[in-house]
């Protein structure tokens, strides 16, 4: 039996982070968590690029362009969609999730869903460096783990 397991402790990787400006009080903290997580695993500052988009709805388009560039081992998308603030919460959240997954499938590069979908700002802040950890950090872990895992498993024939 072969067991494949991604190793997040891997330096030398290039990572792009796409982050939404909407609810920036939350997303700035997610970004800080993601950058901390990448650095803690040995990713060099110069191997990380950050692109800001207006809102979570725009994450997939930019993520897909960056993933297709061949420059990065993994992409991280960060956003905060808060139900209390919008009637179109469900559309924005669903389009972000579907589009991010499509970007990964189209390019074969891991594109990580680091988008909070919460009912309130307080719940979002709790998950952006508050009582419930930092989803940005978790997204960094997932990105490096997936980059390592995809390196190990056989490619499409
Ligand atoms: N974008 C977010 O990232 N989070 C939200 O909570 C949000 N709300 O509340 O509407 C939001 N809307 C903007 C959207 O992502 C697009 O930027 C906008 O519709 C332009 O396409």
Image (cartoon, rainbow, N blue to C red):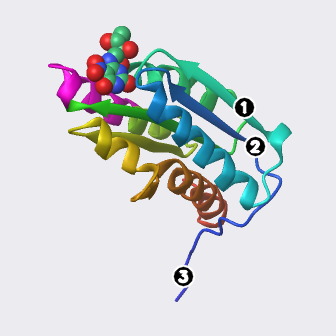
Q: Position of residue 39 (x, y in %)?
A: 75, 53
Q: Are marks 2 and 1 in contact (CB under 8 Å)?
A: yes
Q: Which residue is mark 3?
A: 3
Ranked by sequence position, the earlier of labels 2 and 1 is: 2
Image quadrant assignment for residue 51? top right
Query: Is residue 157 among the parts visible in the rendering?
Result: no
The disc label shown at residue 14, or none: 2
Ranked by sequence position, the earlier of labels 1 and 3 is: 3
Q: Which residues are magenta?
A: 84-99
Instruction: State the residue in front, 1 or 35.
Output: 35
Which residue is depicted at the point 31% across and 31% down?
81
Dot 2 lies on which element? loop
Which residue is depicted at the point 60% across and 47% down?
34
Q: Which class describes the residues within 10 Å of circle 2: few (<14), some (14-19), or many (20+)?
A: many
Q: Position of residue 60 (x, y in %)?
A: 45, 26
Q: Which class describes the residues within 10 Å of circle 3: few (<14), some (14-19), or many (20+)?
A: few
Alpha carbon of mark 2 to alpha carbon of mark 1: how far? Answer: 8 Å
* Mark 1 vs mark 3: in front: 1
Ranked by sequence position, the earlier of labels 2 and 3 is: 3
* Residue 67 is covered by the magenta coloring: no
């Amino acid at each position: 039996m072969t067991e494949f397991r991604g190793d997040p402790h891997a330096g030398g990787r290039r990572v792009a982070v796409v982050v939404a400006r909407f609810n920036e009080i939350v997303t700035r903290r997610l970004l800080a968590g993601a950058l901390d997580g990448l650095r803690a695993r040995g990713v060099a500052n110069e191997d990380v690029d950050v692109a800001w988009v207006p809102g979570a709805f725009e994450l997939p388009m930019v993520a897909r362009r960056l993933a297709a560039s061949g420059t990065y081992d993994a992409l991280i998308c960060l956003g905060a969609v808060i139900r209390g603030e919008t009637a179109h919460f469900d559309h924005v959240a669903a389009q972000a999730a579907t589009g991010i997954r499509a970007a990964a499938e189209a390019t074969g590069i891991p594109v990580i869903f680091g988008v909070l979908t919460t009912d309130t700002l307080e719940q979002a802040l709790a998950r952006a460096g508050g009582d419930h950890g930092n989803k940005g950090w978790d997204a960094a872990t997932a990105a490096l783990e997936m980059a390592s895992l995809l390196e190990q498993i056989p490619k499409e024939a």
